[in-house]
Image (cartoon, rainbow, N blue to C red):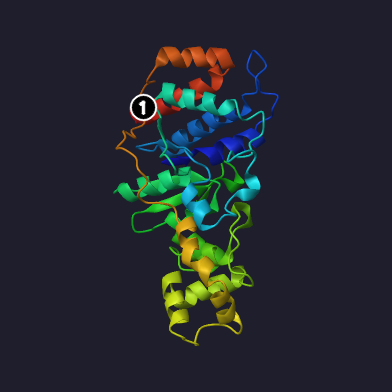
Amino acid sequence: MLLDTPSLYFRAFYGVPDSITAPDGMPVNAVRGLIDMIATLVRDHSPTGLAACMDADWRPAFRVAAIPSYKAHRVATGNEEEVPDALVPQIPVIEEFLDAVGIARLAAEGYEADDVIGTLTHREAGAVDIVTGDRDLFQLVDDARPCRVLYTVRGIRNLQTVDEAFVTQKYGIPGRTYADFATLRGDPSDGLPGVPGIGEKSAAALVSRFGSLEKLLGALDEGVQEGFPSGTRAKLTAARAYLDVAPAVVRVAHDAPMPAADLACPAEPRDAERLVALADRYGLDGPVNRLLSALSSRTAA
């Protein structure tokens, strides 16, 4: 089980009341929410391995170089992400808790959590569950492995299972072509313009007709007329420079530089003394005990 940790702690921050504070008054709603999320996931799904995937760079240089608008609307100062003030000090605390429990916390310099997930998925020979609220990771679903996304749009206790059939039913495209579809359609939430004049339905029709963006562009370059709705060829031709670079931005990396890591779910805390001190300091004995109970029950089973 691979956790899109930033997606989850943002969801926890906005979903758990900010009245949840440490004894010294520091907000810990995101910390508490994330710990309880992980406990629920372990209890309900009994993963054999678990990794908390992190952003080492939320806006990687290689993506910005290709498309300067990439996440530009979310930049605060410098190249830092705009993060709520009350969440900022909670992120290091989340990392401390993960480390003390012994849950693998993985990042790759110059890459996003999505890329860590893509790389681990590519390395892993067995079944993979990806927990995220980010549709970008739908591109990794693969029934043959299987690899699926547990989508948090309806909450952690009511996860939506995304497999190839879901992608096909939702978007009308072959199940493994989400990245090509997203490249054509664009994504304003990430500052990706897409092809002007090509909306979701047109993008789905083109991907379904040609099977992949690569084949679509090949037909475009060869002057093929069949399969292009009226006016579509001109729109694609006008956006050719974008289409040359966008796939490298939209597709998650499969080769982010990370050493091999032990992803086994911990049977007991890596640093029990440190975990007790953290739980006391931040007033989170209940959530920590629930997580330890879930991990213990999984390993006992």
Please identify the quarter of the rendering in which residue 214 is found: bottom left
Left or right: 179 as drawn, with respect to 70: left
Left or right: 230 as drawn, with respect to 53: right
Please identify the quarter of the rendering in which residue 199 is found: bottom right
Classify 4 as above or below 190. Answer: above
Classify 27 as above or below 120. Answer: above
Amino acid type of the residue that numbered disc 1 sits on in the rendered structure: Pro
Residue positioned 36% across, 37% down in the render: 49
Residue 100 lies, in percent from the top left, at 43, 21
Crowd rating for badge 1 (residues with CA inside 10 Å; few <14, some 14–19, many 20+): many
Left or right: 33 as drawn, with respect to 45: right
Kindly tell me whether residue 169 is visible in this rendering. Answer: no
> Which of the pair 299/282 is nearer the observer?
282
Residue positioned 45% across, 80% down in the render: 221
Assign the C terminus to one quadrant of the image: top left
Residue 294 lies, in percent from the top left, at 44, 28
Residue 12 lies, in percent from the top left, at 60, 34
Please identify the quarter of the rendering in which residue 195 is found: bottom right
Residue that mark 1 sits on:
266
Assign the N terminus to one quadrant of the image: top left
> Which of the pair 72/125 is nearer the observer?
72
Residue positioned 34% across, 59% down in the render: 144
Left or right: 184 as drawn, with respect to 47: right
Kindly tell me whether residue 65 is visible in this rendering. Answer: yes
- Total labels: the figure holds 1
**The residue tagged with tag 1: helix, strand or loop?**
loop
